[in-house]
Each structure stands twice: as structure tokens, then as C-alpha cells.
Image (spheres, rainbow, N blue to C red):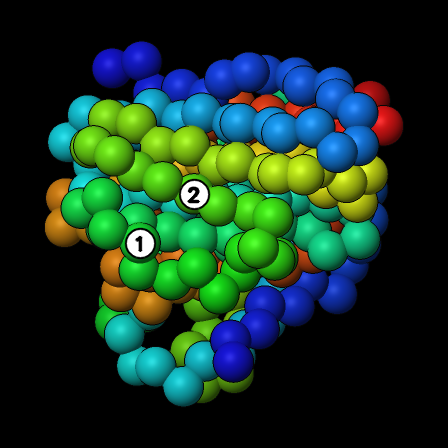
Amino acid sequence: DAGVIQSPRHEVTEMGQEVTLRCKPISGHDYLFWYRQTMMRGLELLIYFNNNVPIDDSGMPEDRFSAKMPNASFSTLKIQPSEPRDSAVYFCASSARVTHHNEQFFGPGTRLTVL
Amino acid sequence: AQTVTQSQPEMSVQEAETVTLSCTYDTSESDYYLFWYKQPPSRQMILVIRQEAYKQQNATENRFSVNFQKAAKSFSLKISDSQLGDAAMYFCAQTNSGYALNFGKGTSLLVTP
């Protein structure tokens, strides 16, 4: 299996622009998580899905952030408009709770820089 | 609210020696899981070891082992025979059944020759 795939690996954009991050979970996994990592706040959950349905989005910073999972093999995290404080590494992770005992498999992350 | 605390921002160990990284957590749940993840400079998050709260036996994975003290809500990671490749950020994390990981702030481990 290819593991969790994220694209792009790096994104540099200007303040006010729309940014879309993409994630392909491991086939067969029924949970998908989006995390954000910053020096100040560490690793924090943004949102997670179970069977393509958003379960907890309480970590989404504000209305500028939105996430979708149109099918079991694809999810997006969108920021519109982007701001410099959104600069961070964004991780996608997936898991199959029953078979993997809650282990989450992480993608390589997307490093976002907003100028 | 669940919290995970790693009180050691940085640790250093000599090659071939043993080091222990500390972690405490707080949860009101009785069924939960604990993890140690490693993040090298490549930033890839790699699972090191996992512990189910209902298991009394401490988990071990080759040179990595944990000391799980459920009553004290403590979950430390011991790395034996440290290698240069062990240098990384180490994150302790806790989750209830089926839900998101709650991470500590991390411990940066330096391994010296």
C-alpha cells in the first residue's frame, strides 16, 4: 500500500489567496483526520471524518477553513482567504479503528507558507 | 478535557546508552490508547509504540519499551542502546476509542556519538 498521500508537499501563497490541500487515505480505512502543526500550538486536530461524514470540526479555527470528504478515497482542506498565521504543516491521517487498534497512519504533510 | 504533558522539551543521550522520555496524561475515560510517535527532520510521523489501557503488561518493540502506570496516568518511553537514527522529536499521544489523537508538546531527543 502506498500509505496516506498528501498534495502538494509544499505550498507558498500570498495573503488573501485560496489554498486547497488534498489527501488520499489508505484504502479500507474508515477514519480520516486533519491535523495542523505549529511551533506555538504543537499538533492539534482540525477535523475528522468517519465513513466520509464529518464527526468533529471543533478544531477548525474559523469560517475561513472548510473540509470535505466526497468519497472514501479523497478529502480536501480549503482555506479561503489565507492569512500569514495559517502558515503551518498540515497533516492528514487515516485509520481503521477495528483492525488497527486506533493506530493512525500519517501522510508526509503539506508545509504551507502564507506571505 | 484531555491533556497530555511532556515535561522535557529536550533530552540528550550518548550512543548505546538508555534514555527515558516522560509523559503524563489526564482522561476520565476507562478505555483509551496511548502512543509514542517519532518525528525526524523529514517531518514524517512514525508510530514507535502503542499501549492499550486495559492491558497491564507494558508494551515493547525491540529497543523501545514503555512504563505504563495507569493509576498515576504516566506513560514513559525507554529507548535502549540508543542509535544516531533515534534523534528526532518524540510525541506522546492519547485517544479514546475511535477518536482523534491528543498530543503532547513533544520532546526533542539528541543522540551524541
Which residue is painted at 61% across and 58% down in the image?
A62
The tally of labels here is: 2
Classed neighbour count for the residue bearing mark 2: other residues with Cα under 10 Å, few (<14), some (14–19), many (≥20): many
Q: Quadrant of residue A73?
A: top left
Return the residue at label 2: A67
Q: Image check: B9 left or right of B31?
A: right
Res. B87 in view = no
Q: Is residue B16 above or below residue B104?
A: above
Q: Secondary structure at mark 1?
A: strand
Quadrant where the C terminus of chain B is found in the figure: top right
Res. B96 in view = yes
Q: Where residue B49 sits in the image (x, y, percent)?
A: 42, 45
Which residue is painted at 65% across and 68% down in the image?
B5
Which residue is painted at 48% across and 65% down in the image?
A58
Q: Image check: B92 left or right of B30?
A: right
Q: Secondary structure at mark 2?
A: strand
Return the residue at label 1: A54
B37 or A19: nearer the viewer: A19
